[in-house]
Image (cartoon, rainbow, N blue to C red):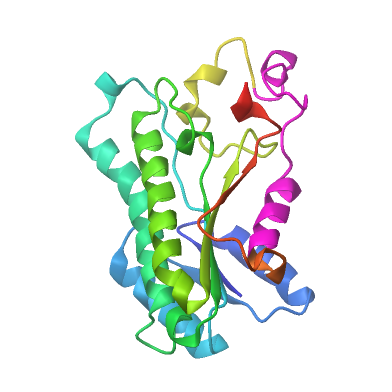
Amino acid sequence: LVLNTRQSAKELDEVAAQCRELGARTVTAVCDVGDADSVRGMVADGIDQLGKIDVLVSNVAIRPHKPITEVSDDEWLQVMSTNLNSAFYLCRAVLGSESGPGMLERRSGSIIALGGQSSITGRPNTTAVTAAKTGLLGLIRAIAAEAAPHNVRANMVNPGSTDTSREHPEWYPEFQGGMTRGSSQHLSDLPMGRQATVQDVANACLFFASDESAYITGDSVNVMGGRYIV
């Protein structure tokens, strides 16, 4: 298991310790996945220590919400680098690693990308995020088509509103007024009447990582409690 963070080293070590307690061989990395060379190094180190990479979960994202007229050039490029370029770099590295047999050569592997509602619907104040997440969906579909003859799958998990901490509340100005995440007003928009739990999202990833989904590729699972249908 290769665990990565860009800056939360303390949390990374805590999660790694939990994984090791469960018997998982675990390698940690502090890597900016928006940088191609850093990704190559991280994947190479993981293969050197573990022998191979069977499953990739690409879940890095930033989500600044603001009107398009207020999005700077630098902000646009940062969102694309973090939300889209990183997935391309990661997928390319695990499919054909320079340090050992990649997924294509081994004819085995599952790629899972974390999208979101922004990859399905357009919403105000999310131009950069929506463009990146929609691009991510296209990337996964193209990889699925290219890798399928090699028995490698690529799929997408789209989480909706999830009950978890928000490290950057300033990214969500729509929740800084009267409505907050988890409030009755917010939950009224969710047909199932509750937010997703982190376990709900993890279960969808586990499905795509396992042989239970061996004949599914280029597809998506929406973990949104029905939000995208209303």
Q: Is residue 72 above or below residue 218?
A: above
Residue shown at 48% from the left, 20% from the top: 173
Residue shown at 59% from the left, 36% from the top: 166
Q: Magenta segment: does it hold 2?
A: no
Residue 158's image quarter? top right
Residue 183 in view:
yes
Task: Pinpoint residue 82: horizontal percent, then vertical percent.
Answer: 37, 50
Q: Is residue 33 above or below residue 160?
A: below
Rendered-image quadrant of the C terminus: top right
Task: Pinpoint residue 187: horizontal percent, then vertical percent.
Answer: 72, 21
Residue 108's image quarter? bottom right
Q: Magenta segment: does it hold 190?
A: yes
Residue shown at 71% from the left, 33% from the top: 225
Q: Nearer the viewer, residue 47 or 5?
A: 47
Task: Pinpoint residue 2: horizontal percent, then vertical percent.
Answer: 56, 73
Numbered range of the magenta stretch = 181-208
Residue 32 in view:
no
Residue 196's image quarter? top right
Task: Pinpoint residue 125: horizontal percent, then vertical percent.
Answer: 39, 22
Q: Is residue 112 left or right of residue 87?
A: right
